[in-house]
Each structure stands twice: as C-alpha cells, then as structure tokens.
Image (cartoon, rainbow, N blue to C red):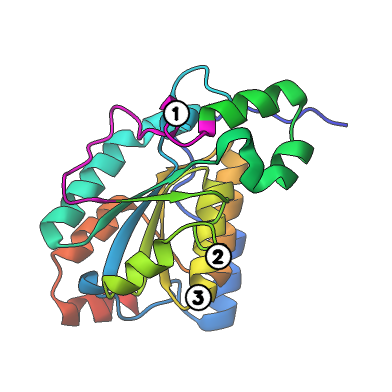
Amino acid sequence: MPKIEAEPRAPGQPRTPPQFAIDAVMRRRGRVRVFEHLDPDAMALLVIDMQEFALAPGSPVEVPAARAIVPTLNRLAGACRRRGVPVIWVTHATLPGGVDWLLFFDNFMLPDVRQGSIRALEQGSEGTRIYRELEVAPGDVRVEKCRFSAFSPGASRLDLVLRSLHRDTVIVTGTKTNICCESTARDAMMLDYKVIFVSDGTAASTDWEHEATLANICQNFGDVMEADELIALFHTPAHAREGAAR
C-alpha cells in the first residue's frame, strides 16, 4: 500500500476548487456560484471543532494547518459580530468512555489512540475547550456535538438554535475540512440551509483532502468563498450582491 503524505504543504491550503470541479459546475448550471441572493441577516457563522483536541501541539489528532487559520477566523468572527451575524462555536465532546459513539471508537483507531482520544474528548476535558488563541465574545453561542456532523440526528442542538435565530444560511469554518466541516455542510444542505464554505477558514491534514472537499462542496452542496469575499459582502448593498452572484 503506498504511503500517504500526512503533513500539509506550506504556506496554506488551496483556496479555490480545482478547475475540473469549476468546469463541471459551469456545464451544469452555467455560473460558478449557487446562490444569486445571499442575505447577511439570514446568516450564522459556524466555527467547527477549533478546540484544544485538534489544535494543541502533540494532541491525539493534531491538525497543524488549523492553527494557521486562527487569525482568519478571528477576523471573520469580528466582522460577523459587527454585522449582526451570530457566531456559533461548535465543539466535539463525548460521554465518559465514549459510550455515545462506540462504533467509531471501537473500530476506526488503534487501542492506544482510542483511549487517548476518548479521554481528550470527554465533556469538560481540556481537549474540548476552544483553542486559546481564538477570540470568543460574550454574546457568542456554544454548541456541543457528539458526531462528525452537527446535524446528525441527536448529535447536537444546532438545528434548533439556528431555527430559533431565524437563520437559513450557514457559513462553515473550522477543522477538519474533509470530515466534520464537510459532514456538517452536506447535512445542512440536505436540511435546506444555504451553505457558504470558507476555503481559507477551514483546514485539513493534507492539501489534497482540503481540495477534494472544495470540489465536493462547489458541485453539490454550496458556495465556496474566501473570508475576505464574505466580509466584503457584508458591506455591499443588496442589489449589488444580487448582481455579483450572477
């Protein structure tokens, strides 16, 4: 079996979907963007799994590239707050012993990795805390999940929170791009949420995993945008936003 490169290439990961995906999108719908109308008043920012478990050096499933997106997320979260877009911190946590997801813990990792991961992810543990360099504001919302997708049945209260806030558009950021972020984005679209996937606000273990998700999202699940594009949209009049999306 060929060796798979586990370290991300510097500096940064791909910010746009690969050309084959863009070509496929143009053949299918005739425009790159899915949504012609995006309303900031309907949006919520989801920051997924940006916690010590994934970002602290030496942690069980450390994602080095996730530390690099911290400044971008702080900047985007600040812009969202100023625009009145709720910031929702979604973190992964399990019951003691991982009993709420034994299928995963018992079958997808070695025994020593399993035990370390379960301990690091138990509710209230250091691993479940939001990474120390991220800026969390008092008015932000916190949601715990116990599955890759925050929208999996019984995984979290995210759907209820969004509906109570009258939000139908989710901005997906965090880590890992190709696991929890993509799973949440896919399920959000299947629940009729509009999805904006932030290409430079998500991080994976390798460039090719990150890029594969950008290809998947832009073709079938939502729009792929960079953080600065999104921030600029917050300051653009509605009629101009609609014209730019075409």
The kind of residue tagged 3 is Leu
Give the foreground label among 3 and 2.
Answer: 3
Magenta span main SS: loop
Please name whichever residue, 185 or 51, is drawn nearer the observer in this view of the structure: 51
Please name whichever residue, 183 or 219, is drawn nearer the observer in this view of the structure: 183
Task: Tell me the quarter of the picture where residue 246 sits.
Answer: bottom left
**Residue located 57% across and 65% down the image:** 153
Give percent across and percent down for residue 175. Answer: 48, 42
Around disc 2, counting alpha carbons within 10 Å, would you say few (fewer than 14), some (14 to 19), or many (20 or more)? many
The kind of residue tagged 2 is Arg
Q: Name the residue carrying label 3.
A: 191
**Residue located 64% across and 28% down the image:** 6
Eyeballing the image, is 33 above or below 212?
below
Give percent across and percent down for residue 243. Answer: 26, 81
**Residue located 28% across and 58% down the image:** 229
Eyeballing the image, is 213 above or below 234?
above
Task: Tell me the quarter of the picture where residue 55 sits.
Answer: top left
The kind of residue tagged 1 is Ser
The answer to if 130 sits in the magenta stretch is yes
CA distance separating discs 3 and 2: 9 Å
